[in-house]
């Protein structure tokens, strides 16, 4: 965990409790959230608010990430979003999985942060790293 000024107490708690290799998922407005996940932070107010990239950038002020997981479909269905996500992780390994597998993998997440994004497949599994 870094210290960058996130005001939302639920997001701060989620990041502080996330250990090395655990998953935090930043989602668009449509990704189904598994019932078994305890931390579900829904920031979506209306279409596009807050945006996925704004939400992701805020999380990245605090969370150290060693790898990301994306849906393969993001590359072809939403290429601009795909490129925008990759720019935030220039030296981080990226794993691609079919969207159906992406949704199954999210069941292992420590928590979810939902944005108001309406861009298809704008979801990322952040695999937590360590500060040392």
Image: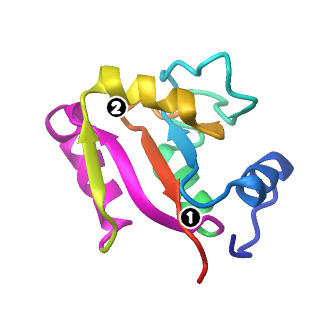
Sequence-first tag of 1 and 2: 1
Numbered mark located on residue 121 in the image:
2
Q: Secondary structure at mark 2?
A: loop
Percent x, y of residue 34: 59, 19
Above or below 72: residue 132: below
The residue under the point 81% across, 59% down is 7
Numbered mark located on residue 131 in the image:
none
In this rendering, position of residue 11 left or right of residue 35: right
Percent x, y of residue 91: 31, 74
**Residue furthest right in the image:** 9
Percent x, y of residue 89: 36, 66
Q: Secondary structure at mark 1?
A: helix
Above or below 116: residue 125: below
**Residue furthest left in the image:** 76
The residue under the point 33% across, 25% down is 101
Above or below 7: residue 111: above
The residue under the point 50% across, 64% down is 65
Percent x, y of residue 1: 69, 70
Please give the range of residues in magenta. 62-90
């Amino acid at each position: 965990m870094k210290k960058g000024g996130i005001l939302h107490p639920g997001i701060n708690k989620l990041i502080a409790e996330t250990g090395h290799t655990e998953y935090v998922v930043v989602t668009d407005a449509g990704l189904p959230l598994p019932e078994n996940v305890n931390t579900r932070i829904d920031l979506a107010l209306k279409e596009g608010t807050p945006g996925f990239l704004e939400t992701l950038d805020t999380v990245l002020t605090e969370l150290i990430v060693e790898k990301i997981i994306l849906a393969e479909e993001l590359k072809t269905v939403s290429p601009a979003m795909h490129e925008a996500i990759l720019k935030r992780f220039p030296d981080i390994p990226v794993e691609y999985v079919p969207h159906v597998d992406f949704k199954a993998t999210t069941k292992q997440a420590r928590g979810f942060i939902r944005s108001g994004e309406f861009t298809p497949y704008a979801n990322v599994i952040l695999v937590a790293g360590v500060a040392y």
